[in-house]
Image: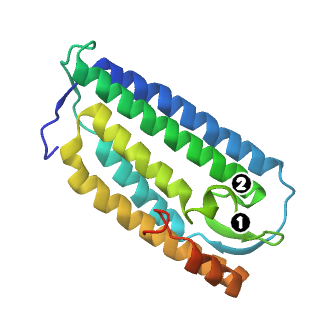
Amino acid sequence: MPFAPEPVGLPGLAALSLGMAGFVGVLLLARLRGRRAPSVADSGRRNASIVWIVVQGGGIACAGVGPIVVTRDPLSAPALLSGAIVLMLMVAASALFDSASRTMGRNWALVARTRGDGTLVETGPFAYVRNPIYVALLLILLALAIACGHLGSLVIALPVFALGTAMRIRHEETVLRAAFGGAYDRYAARVKRFLPGVF
């Protein structure tokens, strides 16, 4: 690991573990809802985005992989503050992902595609940002780096994650424009990708 890990405490690691369990829970629920949806042919699908899913995951992994130095007193202010920050990030990530996947309903999928009976989703968190699930994944990346004491690794993790995310979005926007045409262009002109009104 090119960056020396910073000392951490147990509260941050406990918050990360609880948060990851919650996130996996909402992810499994989203998958279950997707399987319950009636089967229809995809009107557009980009399997090439699987490569960029792996790159994106690699960016997240960079934030968590490596030695963890648990030497902080668990009841110290820095350890408790770190735990609180990690817990807030993970709760926000899980809530955002859950809200987005519920809003998408049968449209949600891991790989970029549109259903033959799909609709353009512009409500819920999609009324504020076009890619709320990727915002949720970024929050998880940050929580990992803080909880594991790997803030230095963000120098690598963030660009790798950004590359994977940018390429996934490129594939997804191609699919959405092909499916929804001008309606998607109007939506994209009105709603920013990641930060409401900014970016």
Q: Is mark 1 on a helix, strand or loop?
A: loop
CA neighbours of label 1 inside 10 A, class few (<14), some (14 to 19), many (20+): some
Q: Is residue 181 visible?
A: no
Q: Residue 51, labelled with which disc?
A: none
Disc nearer the start of the sequence (1/2): 2
Provide residue 42's location: percent of width, then percent of height: 76, 71
Using residue 165 as the reference point, say whether residue 128 is left or right of it.
right
Q: Which residue lies furthest to the bottom in this view?
A: 182
Give the spatial CA distance, label 1 vs label 2: 7 Å
Provide residue 163's location: percent of width, then percent of height: 36, 67
Q: Which residue is depicted at the point 12% across and 38% down?
A: 4
Q: Which residue is depicted at the point 16% across and 32% down?
A: 6
* In-front residue for pair 195/171: 195
Q: Which residue was labeled with disc 1?
A: 121
Displayed quadrant of residue 106: bottom right
Displayed quadrant of residue 24: top right
* In-front residue for pair 128/54: 128
Circles 1 and 2, Cβ within 8 Å, touching? The answer is: yes
